[in-house]
Amino acid sequence: MRILLTADPELPVPPKLYGGIERIVDLLVTGLQARGHTVGLVAHADSTSPANHSFSWRGKRSQNKFDALQNIITLWSAVQQFQPDIIHSFSRILYLLPLLPFDIPKVMSYQRDPSHRTTSWTVKFAKGSLTFTGCSDYICTIGGTSGGVWHTIYNCVELEKYTFQPKVASDAPLVFLSRVERIKGAHTAIAIAKKTGRSLIIAGNHGTTGEAGKYWQEEIVPHLGKDGIEYIGAVNDTQKNELLGQAAAMIVPIEWEEPFGIVFAEALACGTPIISCPRGALPEIIRQGIDGYLINSIEEAVVAVKELPNIDRYQCRQQAEKYFSASVILEQYEKLYSTLVF
């Protein structure tokens, strides 16, 4: 098959540090080529993913109207040049607008909450040529209310990049690995660490201005360097593997409806249990008492930390292998493509 993939214009594929969607697209490029397909990629000009054919977005901002128009033209041109059997979009659905009436199969993948209004009109305009995927049942349930056919295909990780650690030290730290912002619950992770007397390593980027900057300065910075609370900044893949592997648990007590969160799958790949909250897709990722604990309060989290020795880290790794490995997800996408093209 000739498969044309698209990613948002802001970040290169693969990303240099963070960028979950861009990592998934890169895995699809390399994995689909390894399976004998010809792959085209429309992405940021600095992308290094080894697609058979690469096209660069003219516009660099997803939310800018002029850039959106430029990118509609870019995608149209890429389709004319590449002549794909199927188009798979991880970018804005608006870019597909002039292609919707044509019979060529199209897949639109959502990694965040779909817009009911936008999804509804595209379903009508596409007349059966557009299929949707969501990165969780949570996302597909939201999208399904707008009509269309939806398939859950989880995000994935390259298992070979994450070293399974069957045991950690009795005084192993808790690790918060995510963007340091309120909805990710870094402040709650600090409170839990203090109540349990455990050290906490915080890794991830943070805001410097506005509400995000205020949150960082007022609710995170005052705790750093005290009571075993340490901030190490953003981390690359190698550092992430080492950090998660040495952790007693990854603790990210979210305060929003998480669409998926690749970092959760990355933790499981290391055999590291997770402490988070039962919101969004988390109940699909974590089996209570097996892969970690979903908590609703600091008090419940304190109990969960004490029960971490009961978790079999091998079962965490098995969960990642069975549901969130690149090979499993590639097979699911390839099977979907085949049903739409043939």
Image (spheres, rainbow, N blue to C red):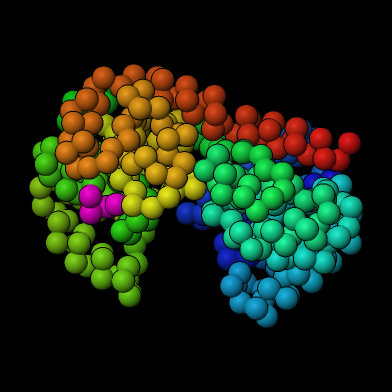
Q: For this rendering, which residue is in front, 138 or 326?
A: 138
Q: Picture coordinates of residue 42 (x, y %)?
A: 72, 59
Based on the picture, tell me whether residue 38 belongs to the magenta stretch.
no
Q: Is residue 314 left or right of residue 173?
A: right
Q: For this rendering, which residue is in front, 201 or 251?
A: 251
Residue at 73%, 75% in the rendered image:
70
In the image, is residue 129 above or below residue 314? below
Q: Picture coordinates of residue 317 (x, y %)?
A: 44, 25
- The secondary structure that dominates the magenta segment is helix
Quadrant assignment for the C terminus: top right
In the image, is residue 166 above or below residue 157? above
Residue at 68%, 80% in the rendered image:
66
Residue farthest toward the bottom in the current orientation of the protein? 66
Quadrant assignment for the N terminus: top right
Query: Is residue 67 in sight in this rendering?
Result: yes
Q: For this rendering, which residue is in front, 122 or 322?
A: 122
Identify the image quadrant of residue 218.
bottom left
Q: Is residue 272 left or right of residue 142?
A: left
Q: Picture coordinates of residue 309 (x, y %)?
A: 24, 22
**Boundaries of the magenta span:** 184-188
Query: Is residue 165 in sight in this rendering?
Result: no
Identify the image quadrant of residue 303.
top left
Q: Picture coordinates of residue 98 (x, y %)?
A: 82, 66
In the image, is residue 331 above or below residue 45? above
Residue at 42%, 35% in the rendered image:
283
- Label count reads 0
Residue at 40%, 27% in the rendered image:
287
